[in-house]
Image (cartoon, helix red, strand yellow):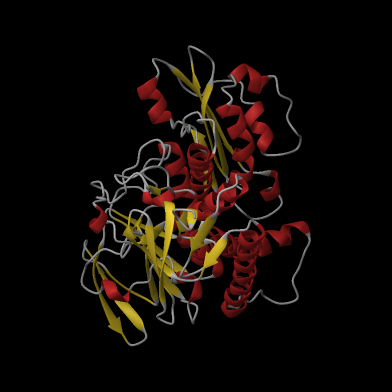
Amino acid sequence: MAEFEYDLFVIGAGSGGVRAARTAAAAGANVAIAEDLYLGGTCVNVGCVPKKLYSYAAHFHDAFDDAAGFGWHLPEPPRFEWATLRDNKSGEIKRLNEIYRRMLENADVTLFDARASLKDPHTVLLKTAEGNTQEVSAEKILLATGGWPWVPDFPGHQHTLDSNQVFDLECFPERFMVLGGGYISVEFASIFNGLGSETHLIYRGNLFLRGFDDEVRDFTRTEMTRKGVNLHFNTNIETIEPVGNAYSVTLTDGRKMEVDAILSATGRKANVAGLGLEALGISLDKVGKIPVNERFETQVPSILALGDLIAGPELTPVALAEAMQLVAHHFSPDEPAPLDYAAIPTAVFCHPNIGTVGLSEEEAREKYAAIRVYRTDFKAMKHTLSASQERTLMKLVVDDATDIVVGAHMVGDDAGEVIQGIAIAVRAGLTKKDFDSTLGIHPTGAEEFVTLRTPTRK
């Protein structure tokens, strides 16, 4: 008889957990996975997917305005219906949940619809919603429970929404406030502004999106302000008090505002509550992450962890890559090369979008003795016949000594789509000469990346 029931037991059926389970099963392992909330994890249910759907919805506001310049006249003013968007989104998420369930079944992965915790280094305790419990043994146990929204403690914080709740509001907020300065806050400020809310973003720092290229941050601030988002920097929420069906918000700079809904987009923390880490001697690092080695092993070698639970970029493609790497380490005869976290492309789906890969100008100046910066900003052809004043920014950062393009940044329509292609070139270490010798696709905005000839600054 086998010593354990499973070779691998995965706790958490999000992007990383499902990829690890399916890949390990394909390598011949006997695999099980447990999920107590929703299949697909944060990305599918309360993250990337619904956020992008809502972003698409918000873009129609600009599209309707732009259409007149191209000869289109709507018979009546457009009217947004929140319930239709919300409920159609929910239907799509349910469809994706079932796809994940079928993917696991087709991969011969045993799925437990239950909450899982650690009993010992090789035993998982499962508890169903009905209160039934059972124990399952596994040679290796993978923790893939992702992150969970964190809300700061201040008077009235209980009246705020978190990023899990904001998708399913009963009523559309005519006045919307978001607290925070990262991806989620900037994206939802753009979304609710585009859907028609009077929108306010509150951030304690002097500019949002810390860690991005400074020029990208400045440009995005200008464009979001142009679109009507009210940005309030160097301030914070002091108190929130209910006023009828609304809320009175007092800021630390003394101002007061009344809004209908407040989103705390103040970050996410590793979702480790109730897993039983302490009893097994698995401690968290100073930022609340689970320390692992290059094989994704915790302080208890049979317990593994990946994705948002460990240090590194909190991005779905990173979790997927880590899952593949983990399986290669533990279920393949050949040891894989170390996972390369350099030049990871990313996008922020604010309006307009941000796409970026590689080093910011500031990072490049610290790393290299000399750099060249090529940048342009322009009104895209799409906006020449409309009344839109939206502009696009494109920027390349080049190491002067080698001519290698070490960073590429864009703010504008479909920036994420464009930068995905540019990311291949940056990852491959192509030079500015390679960019210059590539013919552009005309007329497109993306061709600007291969027609930038004169350095803007050095």
Q: Is residue 126 above or below residue 216?
A: below
Residue 293 in the figure: left or right of residue 458: left
Rendering coords of residue 191 (x, y %): 52, 63
Q: Is residue 345 above or below residue 2?
A: above
Residue 447 in the figure: left or right of residue 419: right
Judge whether residue 349 can be spotted in this image. no
- Residue located at (46% from left, 40% from top): 216
Identify which residue, 402 or 351, lies in the foreground. Answer: 402
- Residue located at (28% from left, 56% from top): 277
Q: Is residue 63 above or below residue 239?
A: above
Rendering coords of residue 100 (x, y %): 61, 62
Specify the farthest residue to the bottom. Answer: 244
Q: Is residue 417 above or below residue 117?
A: above
Q: Quadrant of residue 311?
A: top left
Specify the farthest residue to the front. Answer: 1
Specify the farthest residue to the top. Answer: 401
- Residue located at (42% from left, 47% from top): 306
Pick the quarter of the image with the C terminus: top left
Rendering coords of residue 269 (x, y %): 33, 56
- Residue located at (51% from left, 50% from top): 316
Identify which residue, 208 or 434, lies in the foreground. Answer: 434
Judge whether residue 281 can be spotted in this image. yes
Rendering coords of residue 93 (x, y %): 60, 68
Identify which residue, 150 or 447, lies in the foreground. Answer: 150
Q: How many marks?
A: 0
